[in-house]
Amino acid sequence: MKRIVILISGRGSNMEAIVRSCAEQGWAAQVVAVIANRPAAAGLAYAAERGIATAVVDHQLHARRADFDAALAHAVDSFAPDLLVLAGFMRILGAPFVQRYQGRMLNIHPSLLPAFPGLHTHQRALEAGCKAVGATVHFVTPELDHGPIVMQSVVPVRPADDAAALAARVLATEHTIYPLAARWFIEDKLRVANGLVTQTDGASQVLL
Ligand code: GRF
């Protein structure tokens, strides 16, 4: 059984989607821990109710980012993950942390990367006149919201859409593509070469 650790900061709906898919689809893996950087992260309760270990590494208790990263790495390592999943984890991680888990750490970002890294992606896409938006699952590299792209979802923009409407429709697709990408990793079906990710079965890496 491979071991998955998920990092969250809040609601944790992507974490829920992965926990559910892992259990219902019988992956050869187990979500062994959910770790939050905020004690109030709502997703912690969901994990605890399902008997998953939870931990909090509160960023507010660490003045320097390097100290927070070290405490977080200590907590993560105590669960010996094969895969580390960032699911709405809203802290920037320093290069030493990222390098420690490089190649086995995934993130989801609510835009069609490399467009719109960072925050407020849906509002920025609307202001740019984008006709489609989406979400991206990618391997984490030290540069924020970059890294080899595993899978993307594409969501058309409708004339009446505001940022909240787009966020809701994109989030629904995140709940499909993130579990799928995590499952591919667990099943060793992802290959990275020259920064490009292929799926060994030739499965589509885009959800339209
Ligand atoms: C998602 O939109 C994710 O793409 C972004 O933050 C949000 C987290 O939502 N990184 P949740 O906590 O998984 O519900």
Image (cartoon, grey):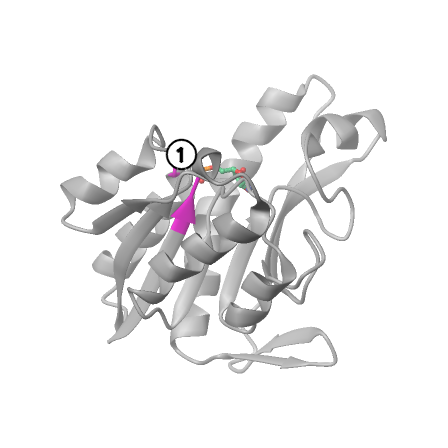
Image: 184 above or below 6: below
- At 52% from the left edge and 70% from the top edge, which residue is drawn? 100
Among the 4 quarters of the image, the one containing residue 77: bottom left
Residue denoted by label 1: 38
Left or right of residue 104: residue 28: left
Q: Is residue 43 above or below residue 195?
A: above
Q: Quadrant of residue 5?
A: bottom left
On screen, 74 above or below 62?
A: below
Q: As shown in the figure, which amino acid type bears the numbered disc 1?
A: Arg
Q: Based on the displayed image, in which of its 4 quarters is residue 179 positioned?
A: bottom left
Which residue is drawn at the image coordinates 62% and 77% (left, top)?
A: 198
Of 52 and 148, the residue lying toward us? 52
Name the secondary structure under disc 1.
loop
Magenta residues, start to end: 7-12
Picture residue at 52% right of the left edge, 61% below the top: 106
In the shown orientation, is residue 7 left or right of residue 121?
Answer: left
